[in-house]
Structures are given as structure tokens and as C-alpha cells.
Amino acid sequence: MTYMHIGKNFVPPDVAGKVTGRIKYAEDYSKEGMVYARLLTSPVPHARVVSIDASEALAMDGVFGLLTADDVYPDGETASVGLKILTNEPTLVGEPILALAAVDEKTAESAITKIAVTFERLPFVLDPLDSLTEGGPDAYSGGNTFVFRQGFASEKWSVDQVASFRAGNEPNAEPQQTFAYGDLEKSFAESSFVYESTFTTAGYPHHSMEPRSAMAYWENGKLYLHGTSQSLTALADGMASIVGVPPEDFVFINQATGGGFGQRARANSIPSMAIPAKLSQKINRPVMMRITREEEFTIGGARQGFQGWIKVGFKPDGVMAAADLFIVSDNGGKGGGADAFSAADAISILYQTEAVRFRGTSIGSNTGHRGAQRGPGQNQIAPIISPILDRAAAELGIDRLEIRKINTPQNGDVGGPQRTPFTSAYMPEALEMGAEMFNYSERIQRSRQRKGTKVTGIGVGQGYHNAGRSGMDGIVRLMADGRLQVHNGVGNLGTYSFASTSRAAAEVLQIPWERVDIVTGRTDRHLPITSPQDGSNSIFTNTRTNYGAAQDLLSKMKEITAMDLGGDMSDYEVGGERIFKISDQDVGMSFAEIAQRGVELGGKFTGESELPEELNDFTKLSVSRLAGQALMGIFHDSRHSNNPPGFTATFTEIELDTETGKYEIIDMVTIGDCGTVVHPQGLKNQLVGGAVWGIGLSGYERHLYDPQNGLPASTGYWQSKVPTMLDTPAKIKTGWVDLPDPENPVGARGIGEPAMGGVSAALTAAISDAMDGHIFNSAPITADMIINQAAGVSSDAIPLAQNNFRG
Amino acid sequence: MKLNLTRRRFIKGVIASGAAATSTSLWYAANGASRPPGAVERLVRLNVNGQTRTVDVAPQETLASTLRYKLGLTGTKLGCNRGECGACTVVVDDIGTYACSVLTHSVKGSKVETVEGLESANGELHPVQQAFVEELSPQCGYCTPGQIMSAVALLRANPNPTREEARWGLSGNICRCGSYDSYLDGVMRAAEIG
Ligand code: FES
Ligand code: FES
């Protein structure tokens, strides 16, 4: 298929602002009369606020007011998971207790030191297995776990059960969640190689580069909130209800977002933005709340850590016959997260396992609050399973790439507990392409070659995440000058998907890109609702909506032309910014002429009547505010069927120094299967960005807490060890399969999350290869673990430890 | 690995300033809107982007605070405000410098350049900016001004760096989006078109 826009690079409209510093993030705004909020946060990991005496602070010059949990929850806080705006029962260090507004931040900070908060300290726990042990402390006052529709509960195993798990055995306790398909027993019986072990993956913070600062003011009864988000309208929709303001009185302004990675997709993951909104309402002044790096660490979200047990069986021909998993996932200080289920689901999909059983239990700890982080679950399991495949390949005498090909998902396959078919799947092509670019057949010969203390490791990895949703809305308009306006509710978090998805509309109208304006950045520009932009779904979801809206517009344009020039709609075609008669191309109307006629005609042409049924309320409001002004295309997307997957295949060579535990990534090739490529440079950025995250998962990133006081020790970039340019290769080679997905009008599916898993799987496999095939059963594998292993010392002082060093 | 001149001088510069910010309270203290009672107003003349700007600067105010909150130059970002990330990088006397970790009073006689000062008078982008657009180096863009200023400083000291030298030159700038590869592509292109 030859496209005008799809598959071509373009300059997204926000890039100039990014390189000149002109684009504005929330903290870059100011407003006349603006005052500053600072937070008083919990100094302890678990407590109850007994009393707050702020009289001295409130009497100080320059102090304007205070906001507490009692103000924002006059009927009391609900017993639910997730961060609250403010709380009287903090369950992690740094959780916001109150906010104070003053003329400047220094005054606010000084005033906060005068506030006397009396805390009743409560028992705390850092490691979920300690809490799971009978008699162990619970992270929340209602228990250590949250059961859907039932509330908080306490889940306990006997001392022996936990000790046995820590000692490396299969847990024999009842799980909270489970799924299974296939005949597990039979599949294990047919296996000639079975691997069984416990494993851990660390939790770690998102650490988006932009702290979640926000500024709010009220004007004529309307709330204006400058904030940060990875999904503009979806987040705004939820934020209005968190603040308690009717959607029609809420304007969310968010031109650019300094990274999201899962924790800015939904309003309930960023309730702190309600603080300046509510404080501003209370004191009747604009309020800016700047968030520090430490605060961002605390309220900015974290990946769930796993303490797990896995057993995998392979048949003599290399087929993965059975996988059995029991995962205790760390729900952190505020509950939440379903990563473990997704981990088992990913194994089922990526390796087409004949029989899978998943058992999972989620337990809280008084550590960073958990929620979705780039490939939640799928990516934690990627580095755990990959070296197991290599061990199986070695035991069965099969090449490491070959065993992946034997088990690869492909077109026509199904996956997961519901045995859901893929919309399309081109993993075999991705593996093939990567192997060629990497020169796998020659490279694999270098595996485990030694030069002094340096050893070469070769790794192959695969990544998966489901990558597409539907059921959202689209709005486009043709203006009187013939320009196309694409109203796009997609957030601007750095993927450029707000722009690339708009190109689907331009494609339908065959209009040059310079003649297209993307209307976005603030909700009073009247935008359609989108899905929350998590789950790598934007490119799939919003090319569907924009394509559909443009189709609606095109059909109206043809109707108008046929009305004025005679004949039937089907006699007309689009091209050269005109609608013309197929039989006589000189007969036609320009886009500008049609747009003007549309306004004259009004009614359905300008959004005043005949709106699509099932249009979401958010979109209805936007359409009603735009109605009558221009010729409009409006679309409500139906639901697609089946699972649109995003897949990656990665190949890497490392040189590992057994004396230092450090390794250099010599080469890395990563290939995406995400349907038709919409925006090559944007896709390349997702692949290399995901690679850096995969390197962090495999080698560096983890929570560290002081076991005595529960204080976080990794609040900054360096301690939590976000990879730098020197931890990553100087060049990451990328490629893509570029075959269309039938459930998307331009053939596209998402890629952001699997881009990380494939790299982590490959890198961990390469480390294991360089260490003579030793399986660490851990993510990350840090330098100290490598040195210990090389010296023949186990690094497991506290087996399966979570939120701390592994020994 | 040979440490290039820019980086070595940069490290020295930060240490010599004696202002490595270690606590968050410094940020707020540094905003400087309220002076200690009785203190003399500290009017300072700064050379920023080729212009002399006169500004009231508190004794402990950081350059990042002055630029962002006094001079309205919000292109300089604060990612950590404690010398970890490089989002605040500006160029001081041709050396890439963390503006969050330098006191404004210490750059009184210096030439300070921020991302806002790179475009030419007729609005033409600086070669580094142009190259970053062409290579689509930024993702979320929050680290971009810092990456650009580090690249500007690097290319002044070493107009034709190898990719490896560029990697070291920009290694003080964290990008959580992981766009390192695209930033390096941008630096290499800037060296070509510069
Ligand atoms: S803000 Fe200055 S180094 Fe991070
Ligand atoms: S582009 Fe987002 S932090 Fe670098």
C-alpha cells in the first residue's frame, strides 16, 4: 500500500519548542498573584495522624492557608487502594499529609516547621514475605492486602511455609488469584527437561524527568489546572471527579509532559494535582505546587517487585510444554498492580506454552506506591524466563535462536488464559530479521570466549505487550480556508503519538501535512476522549478514531459536492485538496468551498445533529461547544476483536569482566513487530528508549530501604540507578517488520512496552551466557552479584529479599 | 577512555563553586523571594545570552533559580535540583555547568548561555538544535535543553568528536526516556552541519 503520510518521517509540531526551550511544562507557567504550596509529608513509614496544630504557622506573615485530609475528605478517607490527595494515615515515608500556601516557598517551608503534627506510629514492613509470615506486621491498618470488592484483609502463611519458599521451594499456600489452561501434569510428564527455581525481581521508581508539579487557579467558577499527564483527555476526565468539579467547569492544560511510563496515564495515579486545585479554591489565589525529586520518588509510582517460584518443562523437540508460576507481588504502600497475572500471560503468549498455571498473591509493604510501569509484569518476567530457555536449549542440544523459533507466536496463534487469537503476529519475521542484522550464526560462535578476565556473552530475547484498544472517539474539522483540524485528546508524553495518530486523518483526506493543524494541549480546545495512554495502545486506538472521523468528514464532503454539482456521492473522489468527479476531474469543489458550504448547511454537517450513537459524554461536551462553526467529522469507534500484540526480538553481545562485575554492551540489535510503521523516527525512539529501560531492569534499578527505620535510600537518580549514557551502548541498531495488522485501518499496533522486555531478556541471557550459563533468577543482576558468583560465593544472604540488597 | 577537556573543566567548575546542592531545602531557600530582615538588596549584573541583565539575587540563590524564576528563562529545566541529572545544564564561559549547583553570585563576571540564547537573531536554529530536530533526538523533551547545552559545550571544545567522545561528553545528562541513541545521532549530525 502506498501512503502519503503513513510510514514517512515528519517534524512533529512540538519539536521546535523542545529544542528552543519554548514549550511549556506545568512548572513553567505563572499567574499574577500566584502563591506557592509546600507539602508536609510523613517522616515515618506507617502512622496515624492524631492531631495537627497549625495555629502558629497560620499566624505567620505571608501564609495564606492550609489544606489537610479533613478538608479534602470531609466524610473521611475511603478504605481503598491507591494514593489519596492527602492522608491521615500514611503508609509510606514521604506521603503528603498537608499542604500550606504562602507568598513564596521559603516562607511556606518555614511555616511548615511550625506545624505540630502528632503521629501515632504503627508497625511497618518492607518485605512482603515478612508481612505474609504469621505474626508479621501489616502495611495497612486493615491488613496487608486488598481484595477486590471486599476491601482490606490480612493474608498469612505459616512461618514454615514462608521459610520453605525462601529456601527455594514451591509455595504450598493458597493463592489469591489463579488461572490455568491445558493439562499441566501431562505436559510436565512429557517434558525431558524441567527447570525449577525461586526468583526475585526488584521494585523501582518511575522517576519521570519532570517532577509532577502543578499550578491551579479558578476564574468565573471554572478550574484551570496546569498539570502533567500522559493521556490528556482521559486523565482530565478522571481528574475533574477527583477534584469534585463538573467536567464542564474544568480546564486541564498540558502542552508537554516530561515522561510518564505508566504513572501519569490515569487521574488516580496522580491525585497530587488536586492539591493546588483545592488549595486555590480555598484561599482564592492561583497556587503553584512544585514537586522535588524526592517527592516525585515517593508519589511518582513504582514497579511491583516479584518474589516468585517458576517451573518450566520442555519436550525433547524444544517445545515449551508447561509453565507453572507462583508469584508474591509487592503492592507497596498503597496497594495496586496486577503485574503477576500479566507475567504469566506473557509467557503463555511469547512461548505458546501448551499448559500454564498461574498462582498469585499480592502483599503490601510500606514502600513506594505501586502501579503500572512500562510493561507491568510482562517485562519483569522477560529477564527471568530468557536464561531458562537457553539452559533448556543447551540441555536438549538445540540452538538458542532455534528454541525461540520453535516456540514463537505467529499469525493464527492464540495466547493467554482465554486463548485469545492475535489480530496478527510477525514474531518469526522479527527473529529472522534480527538474526540477520546481528549476524547471529557467526556471533554465537564467540559465546563464552575468554580474554583474560573478560568473557563474551551472547543473548537473544523477546518482548511482548498487548498493544491496542478501541471504543474511543474522534473529531476533525474542515475550516473555511480548507485546512484540516484534527482535535486530538492524546497526551504529549514524548512518543509524538498525538501527531502521528493525526496523520491517519490527513491520509484519508490526502491533504498535505502543512495544511493540517493538530488541536490539542488543553481541554477547552474541545477534544475527544481517548483511552488512558498506557498499555502501548495510542497508535492503534487513535489512528482508528482519527481515521474514522476523517472518513465521516470525507463522506460529508462528497455529499455536499454531489448536492451542489449533481450526481451521487460515489461519483466523487478526493485529491489535490478537492473533491472531484471521477468521470471529469475538472468538475469539483475545493476543500475551502466545501467547508464554507458545510457551515451554510449546518445541522449534521456542523455537529448540531445526527451525532454518532454511543459518543462518550466527554466528547459530546466538546462537540456541543464546537457545533455550528465548521464542517465536522465525528466518529465513535466500535470495539475490535482479538488481541493486537506488540512484539520485539533483541540480540546482544556483551563483554563481561569477571573481576569487576561490569560489562560493556558491544552490540545490540532490536526489532519491532508493531504492524505497519506510522512514524519511523518515533518508532526508533521507542525501541532505543525501551532498550535503555531494559538495561536498567536487567542490571541496575531497584528500591533500597533502610530496614531499621523504613527510610528510602534510593530517592535520587544515582541511587536508584537510572541508566546513563555510559551504561548503554553508543549505538543501538533498530529495525521493524512493517507488516499490516488487519484490525487497524492503517495497519498499526503499539510498541513502547515490549521494546523494554526484549532487551532485558536478551541482556540477562547474555550475562548468564558469560557466566557459563549460571541462572541468577534475579532482576537486576548487579555487579556485586556477578563478582560473588565468579568467586563462587552466593549473593543470597536474605533469599528472595525485596526492597533491599539481596544480601 | 580519555576524559575530554569540557568534562574535566566542568567537574572542576562545579567543585570550585562550592555550591553542590545537597538538600531540597536549598532550592526553596534559593528562590530568594524573602530576604533576611535588614539585608542589603543584592543587585547583580549578569551576562546572560549576550545581554546584561540586572537582577536581585539572594546570597544563596542558585543560577537555575535566577534564570527560571527571576529572568523567566524557563527553558532551563530542574529535574533533580541536586546535581544528578543535567536537566539544568547551561554554558558558563564555554563550559557545560549544572545551573542547579552553582550560586548566581559566583557567575557575576561570566558569560552565561541558556537554550534560549542559541537561535540567531533571524530565528535560525543553532546547528545543534537543527540537528536534534532532524534526528528527532528528544522524546518528552524535558532533558533536551540540558542535552543541547552539553552538546554545544562539547562541540566548542571538540568540533569533530567521535561517537564515543560524544557519549562521554553528554554522560552527565540523564534521559529517563532513554533517547541517548537519538541524542548521539543529533550530536554527530550537528558536528557535520555545524
Ligand atoms: S537539576 Fe541540576 S543536575 Fe538535575
Ligand atoms: S527526552 Fe524525556 S527525559 Fe530525555
Image (tube, coloured by chain):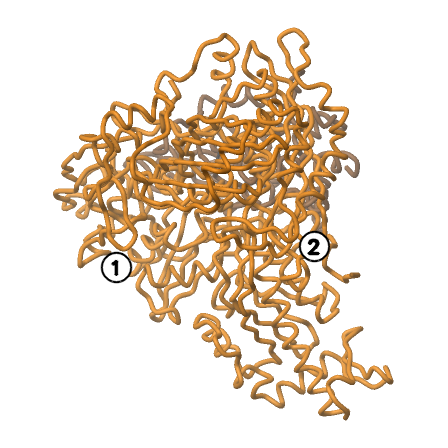
Chain colours: A orange, B brown
Ligand 2 under 8 Å from disc 2 Cβ: no
Considering the image in quadrants, where does the N terminus of chain A appear? bottom right
Quarter-wise, where is residue A474 in the image?
Answer: bottom right
Q: Residues within 10 Å of mark 1 (few under 14, many from 20)?
A: some
Considering the image in quadrants, where does the C terminus of chain A appear? top left
**Could you tell me how far apart the alpha carbons at marks 1 and 2 are, in whole angstroms?**
51 Å
Vertical relation: A657 (above or below) A365: above
Left or right of B12? Residue A363 is: left
Q: Earlier in the sequence, mark 1 or mark 2?
A: 1
Which residue is tagged 1? Answer: A282
Nearer to me, A653 or A246: A653
User: Chain ID for label 2?
Assistant: A
Q: Position of residue A416 (x, y in %)?
A: 50, 48
The secondary element bearing badge 2 is classed as loop
Q: Position of residue B60 (x, y in %)?
A: 39, 31
Q: Position of residue A363 (x, y in %)?
A: 30, 38
Nearer to me, B53 or A647: A647
Vertical relation: A587 (above or below) A328: below
Which residue does the image show at 18% across and 58% down from the upper left? Answer: A74
Vertical relation: B58 (above or below) A493: above
Kind of residue indicated by mark 2: Thr
Which residue is tagged 2? Answer: A676
Vertical relation: A273 (above or below) A457: below
